[in-house]
Image (cartoon, helix red, strand yellow):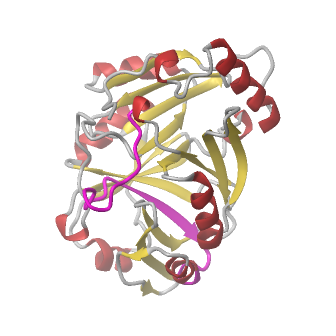
Amino acid sequence: MLEKDKDIATINPYLVVPNLDDAAAYYLEAFGARQAERYEDPNGKVWYAVLKVFGVPLQLMEPDLEMGLRAKDPEEDKEDHFVVAIATTNPESMFKRALGAGSEQMSDFYKEGAAGHGEIRDPFGHRWIVGTRQNPKDRRTAALAPQVVVENVADYVKFVSDVFGAKESRGPLLNRALDRRVLGDVPYTSAKIRGASLQITAANAGRRLGAAPRDGAKGDTFMVTVAVDDVDTTFDRALARGATAIVEPQDAYWGDRYGEFRDLAGLRVACCGPTTLAEEVVDPPALQKELDNFLDIHGMPSSPAEAVNVQNVNAG
Protein backbone atom coordinates (compact mmCIF):
# COMPACT_ATOMS: atom_id res chain seq x y z
CA MET A 1 0.00 0.00 0.00
CA LEU A 2 1.41 3.35 -0.99
CA GLU A 3 2.39 5.90 1.65
CA LYS A 4 -0.30 8.33 0.55
CA ASP A 5 -3.05 5.79 1.31
CA LYS A 6 -2.15 5.28 4.96
CA ASP A 7 -4.11 8.31 6.16
CA ILE A 8 -7.12 7.05 4.18
CA ALA A 9 -6.82 3.53 5.57
CA THR A 10 -5.35 3.60 9.08
CA ILE A 11 -7.04 0.22 9.61
CA ASN A 12 -7.35 -1.85 6.47
CA PRO A 13 -8.61 -5.37 5.60
CA TYR A 14 -6.19 -7.74 3.87
CA LEU A 15 -7.82 -10.81 2.28
CA VAL A 16 -6.31 -14.02 0.89
CA VAL A 17 -8.04 -15.12 -2.33
CA PRO A 18 -7.40 -18.22 -4.49
CA ASN A 19 -6.95 -16.21 -7.70
CA LEU A 20 -6.40 -12.49 -7.77
CA ASP A 21 -7.81 -11.91 -11.24
CA ASP A 22 -11.06 -13.69 -10.32
CA ALA A 23 -11.28 -11.66 -7.12
CA ALA A 24 -10.67 -8.37 -8.89
CA ALA A 25 -13.42 -9.19 -11.41
CA TYR A 26 -15.88 -10.12 -8.66
CA TYR A 27 -15.20 -7.08 -6.47
CA LEU A 28 -15.56 -4.82 -9.51
CA GLU A 29 -18.97 -6.29 -10.34
CA ALA A 30 -20.21 -6.47 -6.73
CA PHE A 31 -18.76 -3.32 -5.18
CA GLY A 32 -17.38 -1.24 -8.03
CA ALA A 33 -13.79 -1.86 -6.86
CA ARG A 34 -10.96 -0.76 -9.14
CA GLN A 35 -7.46 -2.24 -9.21
CA ALA A 36 -4.96 0.39 -8.08
CA GLU A 37 -1.80 -1.68 -7.52
CA ARG A 38 -0.56 -5.07 -8.70
CA TYR A 39 2.90 -6.55 -8.26
CA GLU A 40 4.26 -9.66 -10.00
CA ASP A 41 7.51 -11.57 -10.19
CA PRO A 42 9.13 -12.34 -13.59
CA ASN A 43 7.23 -15.65 -13.75
CA GLY A 44 3.87 -13.90 -13.51
CA LYS A 45 3.16 -14.87 -9.87
CA VAL A 46 1.15 -12.08 -8.24
CA TRP A 47 2.67 -11.16 -4.89
CA TYR A 48 0.22 -8.48 -3.83
CA ALA A 49 -2.51 -6.20 -5.14
CA VAL A 50 -4.64 -3.31 -3.94
CA LEU A 51 -8.17 -2.52 -5.06
CA LYS A 52 -9.96 0.72 -4.26
CA VAL A 53 -13.55 0.69 -2.98
CA PHE A 54 -14.95 4.22 -2.79
CA GLY A 55 -11.31 5.32 -2.82
CA VAL A 56 -10.37 3.16 0.19
CA PRO A 57 -7.72 0.43 -0.27
CA LEU A 58 -8.61 -3.27 -0.05
CA GLN A 59 -5.47 -5.42 0.05
CA LEU A 60 -5.37 -8.85 -1.60
CA MET A 61 -2.88 -11.68 -1.76
CA GLU A 62 -2.95 -15.17 -3.24
CA PRO A 63 -2.18 -18.12 -0.90
CA ASP A 64 1.40 -18.44 0.35
CA LEU A 65 1.69 -21.43 2.68
CA GLU A 66 5.26 -20.55 3.65
CA MET A 67 3.87 -17.30 5.01
CA GLY A 68 1.00 -19.18 6.68
CA LEU A 69 -1.57 -17.60 4.35
CA ARG A 70 -4.24 -19.83 2.81
CA ALA A 71 -7.50 -19.50 0.93
CA LYS A 72 -10.71 -20.25 2.79
CA ASP A 73 -12.09 -23.79 2.48
CA PRO A 74 -15.91 -23.85 2.23
CA GLU A 75 -15.98 -27.40 3.60
CA GLU A 76 -13.90 -26.63 6.68
CA ASP A 77 -14.43 -22.93 7.37
CA LYS A 78 -18.06 -23.02 8.46
CA GLU A 79 -17.67 -20.10 10.88
CA ASP A 80 -16.41 -16.62 10.07
CA HIS A 81 -13.77 -15.05 12.31
CA PHE A 82 -13.57 -11.80 10.38
CA VAL A 83 -16.05 -9.64 8.47
CA VAL A 84 -15.57 -6.65 6.19
CA ALA A 85 -18.23 -3.95 6.56
CA ILE A 86 -18.83 -1.85 3.46
CA ALA A 87 -20.92 1.32 3.74
CA THR A 88 -22.76 2.94 0.88
CA THR A 89 -25.64 5.32 0.32
CA ASN A 90 -27.68 2.58 -1.42
CA PRO A 91 -26.92 -0.66 0.43
CA GLU A 92 -29.93 -2.62 -0.81
CA SER A 93 -28.87 -2.15 -4.43
CA MET A 94 -25.29 -3.21 -3.61
CA PHE A 95 -26.56 -6.21 -1.64
CA LYS A 96 -28.57 -7.40 -4.65
CA ARG A 97 -25.64 -6.72 -6.98
CA ALA A 98 -23.30 -8.79 -4.81
CA LEU A 99 -25.76 -11.69 -4.83
CA GLY A 100 -26.05 -11.44 -8.60
CA ALA A 101 -22.26 -11.57 -8.88
CA GLY A 102 -22.17 -14.96 -7.13
CA SER A 103 -22.25 -14.31 -3.37
CA GLU A 104 -23.96 -16.51 -0.82
CA GLN A 105 -26.73 -14.77 1.10
CA MET A 106 -26.03 -14.90 4.84
CA SER A 107 -28.98 -12.83 6.05
CA ASP A 108 -32.09 -11.06 4.90
CA PHE A 109 -31.73 -7.41 3.98
CA TYR A 110 -33.08 -5.44 6.94
CA LYS A 111 -34.38 -1.89 6.71
CA GLU A 112 -35.26 0.51 9.50
CA GLY A 113 -35.88 4.09 8.50
CA ALA A 114 -32.99 5.28 6.32
CA ALA A 115 -30.67 2.49 7.53
CA GLY A 116 -30.15 -0.88 5.88
CA HIS A 117 -28.12 -4.03 6.61
CA GLY A 118 -27.49 -7.28 4.76
CA GLU A 119 -24.76 -9.94 4.97
CA ILE A 120 -23.18 -11.99 2.20
CA ARG A 121 -20.24 -14.36 1.78
CA ASP A 122 -18.27 -13.76 -1.39
CA PRO A 123 -17.19 -16.60 -3.75
CA PHE A 124 -13.80 -16.74 -1.98
CA GLY A 125 -15.31 -17.38 1.45
CA HIS A 126 -15.02 -13.88 2.93
CA ARG A 127 -18.01 -12.45 4.74
CA TRP A 128 -19.26 -8.90 4.17
CA ILE A 129 -21.77 -6.62 5.82
CA VAL A 130 -23.40 -4.26 3.32
CA GLY A 131 -24.80 -1.31 5.25
CA THR A 132 -25.69 2.35 5.19
CA ARG A 133 -23.09 5.09 5.18
CA GLN A 134 -23.84 7.13 8.29
CA ASN A 135 -22.45 10.32 6.79
CA PRO A 136 -23.12 10.49 3.02
CA LYS A 137 -20.40 13.13 2.64
CA ASP A 138 -17.75 10.83 4.08
CA ARG A 139 -16.50 8.90 1.04
CA ARG A 140 -13.23 7.67 2.54
CA THR A 141 -12.79 6.40 6.07
CA ALA A 142 -16.37 5.10 6.47
CA ALA A 143 -16.39 3.04 3.26
CA LEU A 144 -14.63 -0.10 4.60
CA ALA A 145 -14.25 -1.25 8.18
CA PRO A 146 -12.86 -4.57 9.41
CA GLN A 147 -14.90 -6.42 12.03
CA VAL A 148 -13.18 -8.95 14.28
CA VAL A 149 -15.03 -11.72 16.13
CA VAL A 150 -13.82 -12.26 19.72
CA GLU A 151 -14.71 -14.32 22.76
CA ASN A 152 -14.72 -11.36 25.16
CA VAL A 153 -15.43 -7.88 23.80
CA ALA A 154 -14.30 -6.00 26.93
CA ASP A 155 -10.94 -7.82 27.06
CA TYR A 156 -10.30 -7.09 23.39
CA VAL A 157 -11.18 -3.41 23.75
CA LYS A 158 -8.62 -3.18 26.56
CA PHE A 159 -5.99 -4.88 24.38
CA VAL A 160 -6.39 -2.50 21.41
CA SER A 161 -6.56 0.44 23.81
CA ASP A 162 -3.29 -0.56 25.48
CA VAL A 163 -1.50 -1.41 22.23
CA PHE A 164 -2.82 1.19 19.77
CA GLY A 165 -4.27 3.86 22.03
CA ALA A 166 -7.73 3.00 20.68
CA LYS A 167 -10.79 4.78 22.02
CA GLU A 168 -14.03 2.85 22.35
CA SER A 169 -16.97 4.24 20.42
CA ARG A 170 -20.26 3.10 21.91
CA GLY A 171 -22.60 4.46 19.23
CA PRO A 172 -24.96 2.17 17.30
CA LEU A 173 -23.71 0.10 14.36
CA LEU A 174 -26.55 1.35 12.11
CA ASN A 175 -29.32 2.78 14.25
CA ARG A 176 -30.55 1.48 17.57
CA ALA A 177 -33.74 -0.10 16.23
CA LEU A 178 -31.93 -1.93 13.41
CA ASP A 179 -29.12 -2.97 15.76
CA ARG A 180 -31.69 -4.76 17.93
CA ARG A 181 -33.08 -6.61 14.90
CA VAL A 182 -29.68 -7.63 13.53
CA LEU A 183 -27.57 -8.14 16.65
CA GLY A 184 -30.11 -8.88 19.36
CA ASP A 185 -28.25 -9.20 22.66
CA VAL A 186 -24.86 -10.04 21.11
CA PRO A 187 -22.19 -7.72 22.60
CA TYR A 188 -20.86 -5.31 20.01
CA THR A 189 -18.75 -2.16 19.97
CA SER A 190 -16.14 -0.38 17.88
CA ALA A 191 -12.76 1.14 18.64
CA LYS A 192 -11.24 4.16 16.94
CA ILE A 193 -7.56 4.02 16.02
CA ARG A 194 -6.34 7.33 14.65
CA GLY A 195 -9.89 8.12 13.59
CA ALA A 196 -10.60 4.82 11.79
CA SER A 197 -13.02 2.19 13.10
CA LEU A 198 -12.28 -1.39 14.09
CA GLN A 199 -15.61 -3.11 14.71
CA ILE A 200 -15.67 -5.75 17.46
CA THR A 201 -18.40 -8.34 17.95
CA ALA A 202 -18.77 -11.36 20.21
CA ALA A 203 -18.81 -14.89 18.82
CA ASN A 204 -22.33 -16.09 18.05
CA ALA A 205 -23.13 -19.60 16.83
CA GLY A 206 -26.52 -18.55 15.50
CA ARG A 207 -24.88 -16.06 13.12
CA ARG A 208 -22.02 -18.51 12.33
CA LEU A 209 -19.46 -16.16 13.84
CA GLY A 210 -16.61 -17.67 15.85
CA ALA A 211 -13.39 -16.40 17.36
CA ALA A 212 -10.23 -17.32 15.45
CA PRO A 213 -7.89 -20.02 16.84
CA ARG A 214 -5.36 -18.36 19.12
CA ASP A 215 -2.48 -20.42 17.70
CA GLY A 216 -3.19 -19.85 13.99
CA ALA A 217 -2.83 -23.61 13.54
CA LYS A 218 -4.89 -23.77 10.34
CA GLY A 219 -3.19 -20.80 8.70
CA ASP A 220 -4.59 -17.34 8.10
CA THR A 221 -7.14 -16.34 5.48
CA PHE A 222 -7.10 -12.64 6.33
CA MET A 223 -5.16 -9.96 8.18
CA VAL A 224 -5.69 -6.42 9.36
CA THR A 225 -3.13 -3.75 8.53
CA VAL A 226 -2.76 -0.88 11.01
CA ALA A 227 -0.73 2.23 10.18
CA VAL A 228 1.16 3.41 13.28
CA ASP A 229 3.74 6.07 14.08
CA ASP A 230 6.19 3.66 15.75
CA VAL A 231 6.10 0.01 14.67
CA ASP A 232 8.71 -1.20 17.18
CA THR A 233 7.02 0.34 20.20
CA THR A 234 3.58 -0.90 19.12
CA PHE A 235 4.98 -4.39 18.50
CA ASP A 236 6.62 -4.52 21.95
CA ARG A 237 3.42 -3.35 23.63
CA ALA A 238 1.44 -6.08 21.85
CA LEU A 239 3.85 -8.85 22.86
CA ALA A 240 3.91 -7.59 26.46
CA ARG A 241 0.12 -8.02 26.52
CA GLY A 242 0.12 -11.58 25.21
CA ALA A 243 0.44 -11.30 21.41
CA THR A 244 2.68 -13.71 19.47
CA ALA A 245 5.36 -12.53 17.02
CA ILE A 246 5.01 -13.55 13.35
CA VAL A 247 7.34 -11.09 11.60
CA GLU A 248 9.71 -9.11 13.82
CA PRO A 249 9.89 -5.36 13.04
CA GLN A 250 12.14 -4.71 10.06
CA ASP A 251 12.68 -2.35 7.13
CA ALA A 252 10.56 -3.89 4.37
CA TYR A 253 11.62 -3.82 0.73
CA TRP A 254 8.66 -1.60 -0.22
CA GLY A 255 9.80 1.07 2.21
CA ASP A 256 7.75 0.61 5.39
CA ARG A 257 8.94 -0.23 8.83
CA TYR A 258 6.88 -3.40 9.20
CA GLY A 259 6.00 -6.18 11.65
CA GLU A 260 3.27 -8.78 12.22
CA PHE A 261 1.84 -10.37 15.35
CA ARG A 262 -1.14 -12.53 16.36
CA ASP A 263 -3.27 -10.74 18.92
CA LEU A 264 -5.38 -12.01 21.82
CA ALA A 265 -8.32 -12.82 19.54
CA GLY A 266 -6.20 -14.85 17.11
CA LEU A 267 -6.25 -11.99 14.59
CA ARG A 268 -3.13 -11.57 12.47
CA VAL A 269 -2.15 -7.91 12.57
CA ALA A 270 0.35 -6.19 10.29
CA CYS A 271 1.79 -2.93 11.60
CA CYS A 272 3.25 -0.53 9.08
CA GLY A 273 5.03 2.71 9.85
CA PRO A 274 6.51 5.65 8.01
CA THR A 275 8.67 4.91 4.98
CA THR A 276 12.31 4.03 5.60
CA LEU A 277 13.54 4.62 2.04
CA ALA A 278 15.59 7.68 1.17
CA GLU A 279 12.87 8.64 -1.29
CA GLU A 280 9.18 7.84 -0.83
CA VAL A 281 7.72 5.23 -3.16
CA VAL A 282 5.01 7.28 -4.77
CA ASP A 283 3.57 5.08 -7.53
CA PRO A 284 3.16 1.39 -8.47
CA PRO A 285 5.97 1.35 -11.10
CA ALA A 286 8.44 2.53 -8.45
CA LEU A 287 7.21 -0.11 -6.01
CA GLN A 288 7.47 -2.82 -8.70
CA LYS A 289 11.13 -1.84 -9.07
CA GLU A 290 11.61 -2.29 -5.32
CA LEU A 291 10.05 -5.78 -5.59
CA ASP A 292 12.27 -6.65 -8.56
CA ASN A 293 15.32 -5.58 -6.56
CA PHE A 294 14.19 -7.64 -3.55
CA LEU A 295 13.70 -10.71 -5.74
CA ASP A 296 17.11 -10.28 -7.34
CA ILE A 297 18.88 -9.92 -3.99
CA HIS A 298 17.21 -13.04 -2.58
CA GLY A 299 17.62 -15.26 -5.64
CA MET A 300 14.06 -15.10 -7.00
CA PRO A 301 12.27 -16.77 -4.05
CA SER A 302 8.73 -18.07 -4.49
CA SER A 303 7.79 -16.53 -1.14
CA PRO A 304 9.14 -13.74 1.10
CA ALA A 305 8.91 -16.06 4.13
CA GLU A 306 12.61 -16.87 4.49
CA ALA A 307 13.75 -13.31 3.79
CA VAL A 308 11.49 -11.79 6.45
CA ASN A 309 12.01 -14.70 8.87
CA VAL A 310 8.33 -15.51 9.34
CA GLN A 311 7.58 -17.57 12.47
CA ASN A 312 4.72 -19.12 14.42
CA VAL A 313 2.59 -19.92 11.37
CA ASN A 314 1.24 -23.10 9.84
CA ALA A 315 3.40 -23.67 6.75
CA GLY A 316 0.95 -26.15 5.26
Q: In which quadrant of the rendered view does residue 238 lie?
A: top left
Tell me the residue at 32%/42% (across/down): 157
Quadrant housing the C terminus = top left
Residue 83 lies in the magenta-colored region: yes
Residue sitting nearer the eye, 130 or 135: 130
Compared with residue 274, is residue 152 higher up or lower down, i.e. above or below? below
Compared with residue 271, is residue 237 higher up or lower down, i.e. above or below? above
Residue sitting nearer the eye, 233 or 149: 149
Q: In which quadrant of the rendered view does residue 170 lie?
A: bottom left
Residue 307 lies in the magenta-colored region: no
Q: Which residues are magenta?
A: 68-93
Left or right side of 276 for 312: left
Picture coordinates of residue 111 (x, y %)? 44, 86
Tell me the residue at 74%/38% (across/down): 4
The chief SS type of the magenta part is loop
Compared with residue 212, is residue 209 higher up or lower down, i.e. above or below? below
Quick check: can you spot residue 165? no
Tell me the residue at 35%/75% (across/down): 106
Picture coordinates of residue 247 (x, y %)? 43, 21
Tell me the residue at 48%/87% (across/down): 113
Picture coordinates of residue 41 (x, y %)? 67, 32
Quadrant housing the N terminus = top right
Compared with residue 24, is residue 41 higher up or lower down, i.e. above or below? above
Residue sitting nearer the eye, 183 or 99: 99
